[in-house]
Amino acid sequence: MNRQQIIGPWRVATGYIVTAGLSFALGCAGTTPPSAQQLADVQSANRSATELGAHKNPRAELHLKLAEEQLQQAERAISDDDDERANGLLMRAKADAELAIALTREDNANTQASKAVEQSDAKLGATP
Amino acid sequence: MNKSIIVKTGLVLLLGHAAGCATTTTPVELTTARASYQQATQGAAASHDPADLHTAKSAMNAAERSFEEDGNTQETRDLAYTADRRARIAEARGNASKATEEQKKTIDDMHSTQAAELGQANKKLEQQGQTMEAQAAQVASEREARLAAEKRAAQATADLAKFASIKEESRGMVITLSGGVLFASGKSDLLPAAQLKLNSVADALMQQDPDSKMVVEGHTDSQGGDAYNQDLSQRRAQTVRDYLVSRGVAADRATAQGFGPSRSIADNKSAEGRANNRRVEIVVEPKSPAKI
């Protein structure tokens, strides 16, 4: 009985700590540091977007900028040992870089399609 | 002491919970992602890029699950932000794929139309070529026929010249056949040999202008009565005229007229002169001048 009276509050306290820890762990899962490959992937996607002309495309330009900024932020988070934030930022940066590429390609494809129509109209219109 | 520990652990719990789960308000990123995904499903991605649309759906599900389980956490916002981009990537790639497909179709259609037009132009040229060939062949054939006709006419005239005299006079072309060659004395029936000669005459006449008229004239010498000679000359002229018509000379071109001895061309006192006077003349009238 006595022993239980002494240990009781500790047990309760330990229970809360464990619960709090679990709760924190659930909220902040995935704290593995980003791999060098993840960083390289984003850098590569940004380069591809630039080579494709995303920085000259009004719609794609914003997403290329976001990707570049988020990559820089991720690199800072890595230096600050904030792996969780770094992972999230890299995930965002990669998605933005890929969107910049997709938007540039979409506009290029639309331009080509319009050119084909103009070319067709010019050639077929010229014949009697 | 115990109370203080409980309070402290309670605070730790609250801080831990706050850091881990944050609030349950729907993050803007998730609302935006839902709208983007909805838009992507209604666009070209559904038909042209189902793979990327599926990736967007998986990203969307991850964001929704994170929000459901953990609420408005940084992770949920990151996942939702990424899901929004995945949906827009699917939409853009679907649109690009559709545009490329349309471009290809435009070019294919253009090539098909050009090929069809070229085919029609070739066919037209071929037809024109055939028409020109046919015209050239017709011209050659007409030229050949004309040359052949000229040759036949020359031949007929040459044949005719063997037994008849041909003269161009003011009254027209005059073909003179000796009466002795055509008829027995006092008769108006053609001698068998005469028919062959008249065949040549008919051939020659048919080579002439088909509209020119002709008069077959019968002439005698002055021996015998005038009435008799007039009648004989008329019958002989008619016999020759009828024979020529039977050989193909148009009936309305030829008439017969007997002159008896009235138009002598030689002296009736000598036998040679009388022989010359006994004759049949075919007078082909000169071509009438073209009427304006």
Image: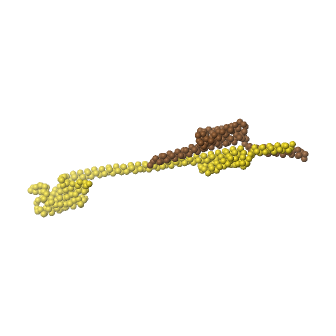
Chain colours: A brown, B yellow
Drawn side of residue A124 relative to residue B233, left or right: right
Who is closer to the viewer here, A5 or B134?
A: A5
Q: Find residue B20 and report its horizontal and vertical position in percent.
A: 75, 44
Q: Is residue B193 visible?
A: no
| Quadrant of res A66 | top right
Residue closest to the eye, B39 or B247 = B39
What number of labels is visible?
A: 0
Work out whether residue B80 or residue B132 is closer to the camera in this orientation and state it: B80
| Residue B232 % position (x, y) | 15, 62
In the image: residue B168, left or right of residue A14: left
Residue A74, given in percent of the width and then of the height, sits at 69, 39
Residue at the image point whose x is 59% and y is 49% from the top? B44
| Left or right of residue B233: residue B34 | right
Q: Is residue B86 left or right of residue B156?
A: right
Q: Residue furthest right?
A: A2
Is residue B43 visible in the rendered image? The answer is yes
B201 is higher (above) or lower (below) than A114: below
